[in-house]
Image (spheres, rainbow, N blue to C red):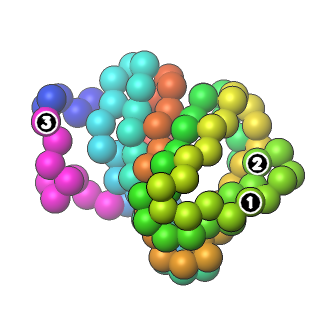
């Protein structure tokens, strides 16, 4: 578990999670997790689901976000909210970053 109350982005490593997609776990405790996910243009976050509630902020770029079979284009400044167990995925229409928040934390990420 990360210990510091103040986290510096440059001190944290990126982890490759698929072609053109990498993530960085920014901070977490048992109840909450913040993760930065960087996509190259064309990078895909495959359709999946999990029991966690998730909110994601589009920090930069443009994405085709699919939630429960419906796809919409989101750009920097937009947000999407996922209740538990809803199938979802993302395709980067241009390079960009999503900031994901999960509750409870994603044990499978650590």
Mark 2 crowdedness (10 Å alpha carbons): few <14, some 14-19, many ≥20: some
Q: Earlier in the sequence, mark 3 or mark 1?
A: 3
Which quadrant: the C terminus? top left
Check whether the beta carbons of the residues at disc 3 and disc 2 lie within 8 A of each other. Answer: no
The spot of residue 26 in percent (x, y) is 30, 44
The residue sitting at 49% across, 70% down in the picture is: 61
Q: Give the image location of residue 21, x and y in percent.
A: 49, 68
Give the residue at mark 1: 72
Pinpoint residue 6: horizontal percent, then vertical percent. 13, 36
Q: Earlier in the sequence, mark 1 or mark 2?
A: 2
Q: Main secondary structure of the magenta part?
A: loop
* Label 1 vs label 2, nearer the camera: 1
Contact flag, marks 1 and 2 (Cβ < 8 Å): yes
Q: What kind of element bears circle 2? A: strand
The alpha-carbon separation of the residues under discs 3 and 2 comes to 33 Å
- Residue 58 appears at what percent x and percent y? 49, 56
Instruction: Specify whether 32 is left or right of 7.
Output: right
Q: Which residue is mark 2?
A: 67
Q: Is residue 5 above or below residue 56?
A: above
Q: Which sits in the foreground, 73 or 27?
A: 73
- Label 1: element kind: strand
Q: Which residues are magenta?
A: 6-14
* Residue 11 among those drawn in magenta: yes
- Tell me, yes or no, whether the two marked residues, 3 and 1, touch with CB atoms within 8 Å: no
Please tell me which residue is depicted at 86% across the width and 52% down the height of the picture.
Answer: 69
Q: Looking at the image, is mark 3 or mark 1 nearer the viewer?
A: 1
Q: Residue furthest right?
A: 69
Q: Residues within 10 Å of mark 1 (few under 14, many from 20)?
A: few
- The residue wearing badge 3 is 6
CA–CA distance in space, label 1 to label 2: 9 Å
Which of the two labelled residues, at mark 3 and mark 2, occupies the earlier sequence position? 3
């Amino acid at each position: 578990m990360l210990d510091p109350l103040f986290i510096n982005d440059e001190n944290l490593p990126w982890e490759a999670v698929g072609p053109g997609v990498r993530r960085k776990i920014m901070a977490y405790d048992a109840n909450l997790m913040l993760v930065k996910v960087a996509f190259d243009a064309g990078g895909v976050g495959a359709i999946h689901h999990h029991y966690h509630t998730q909110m994601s902020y589009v920090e930069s770029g443009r994405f085709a976000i699919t939630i429960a079979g419906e796809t919409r284009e989101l750009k920097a400044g937009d947000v999407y909210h996922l209740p538990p167990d809803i199938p979802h995925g993302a395709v980067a229409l241009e390079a960009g970053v999503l900031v994901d928040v999960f509750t409870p934390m994603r044990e499978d990420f650590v």
